[in-house]
Amino acid sequence: MKIEYLGHSCFKLTESTGTSIVCDPYSEEIGYKMPVTSANAITISHEHYDHNAVKNVGGNPEIIKEQSSFSLPGVEVDAVKSFHDGRRGKMRGENTIFKFRMDGIDVCHLGDLGEECSSALIEAILPVNVLLIPVGGNYTIDAEMAKEYVDRIMPDVVIPMHYRVKDCKLDIDKVDEFLKLFDEEIIEEYEENCLELSRSDLNGGTRIVVLRKN
């Protein structure tokens, strides 16, 4: 499978036979434009402009928002209810976590998760091979809370998202705040925005992979 980072919290996941899903497409209101792309489906974690810009994805995709299970050719999709804040949604509402089973790999996109780590939520999303996790704080969990999720989920690959980059207008932290909580030897910083994985790449240890938006 292929994972492409399109910026902010947006990823394009492509299964080996070609089925593709774009997660949380964003509006240029965040300060920069989303790359041109297309997909078979789009998942939306919640209805905020930096996560629901479906018009930016071509290909007449199916829109997936509901908290239930879906099947696409070669892909299984599950949704888990969570909250966008630490007060059970009273501040920012609900957030949907999406899990994808592609090529024998379990990928979890946490959306704009804002609630504290709990055993119930961890059980609901396990198992996870690849964790796409917000780390910028303010609107989501911050670096330290993200570290707790990583420690409890123990995925093979962690890809941070929803952090401040050049031209970003959102009041969120840079990815450095998250990275400094881990040993340098498990951090891989890519110059490109793409990561290709197979089951043989999952060796049981956790590595942090930073992908750069093109």
Image (cartoon, rainbow, N blue to C red):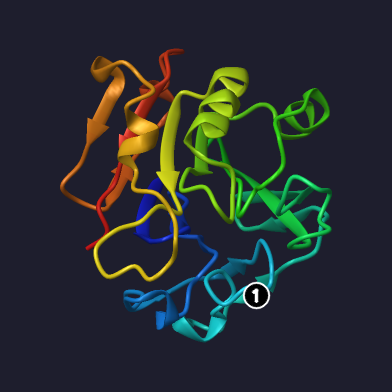
Would residue 45 appear left or right of 105 to someone viewing this image? right
The one of 108 and 161 positioned closer to us in this rendering: 161
Q: What residue is at 49 percent from the left and 82 percent from the top?
A: 59
Q: Is residue 104 visible?
A: yes
- What type is the residue that disc 1 sits on? Glu
On screen, residue 46 above or below 209: below
The part of the image, by quadrant, that contains residue 128 is top right
Q: Position of residue 150 (x, y in %)?
A: 54, 25
Q: What residue is at 47 percent from the left and 36 percent from the top?
A: 143
On screen, residue 41 above or below 210: below
Query: Image quadrant for the N terminus?
Result: top left
For the image, the number of numbered tags is: 1
Query: Image quadrant for the C terminus?
Result: bottom left
Q: Position of residue 27 (x, y in %)?
A: 46, 80
Q: Which residue is mark 1?
A: 62
Circle 1 Cα neighbour tier, 10 Å, few/some/many (<14 / 14–19 / ≥20): some
Where disc 1 sits, the SS reads strand
Q: Position of residue 36 (x, y in %)?
A: 33, 79
Q: What residue is at 74 percent from the left and 45 percent from the top?
A: 86
Would residue 187 appear left or right of 205 to someone viewing this image? left
Q: Position of residue 55 (x, y in %)?
A: 52, 86
Q: What residue is at 50 percent from the left and 43 percent from the top?
A: 132
Q: Is residue 197 visible?
A: no
On screen, residue 126 above or below 25: above
On screen, residue 2 above or below 180: below
The part of the image, by quadrant, that contains residue 185 is top left
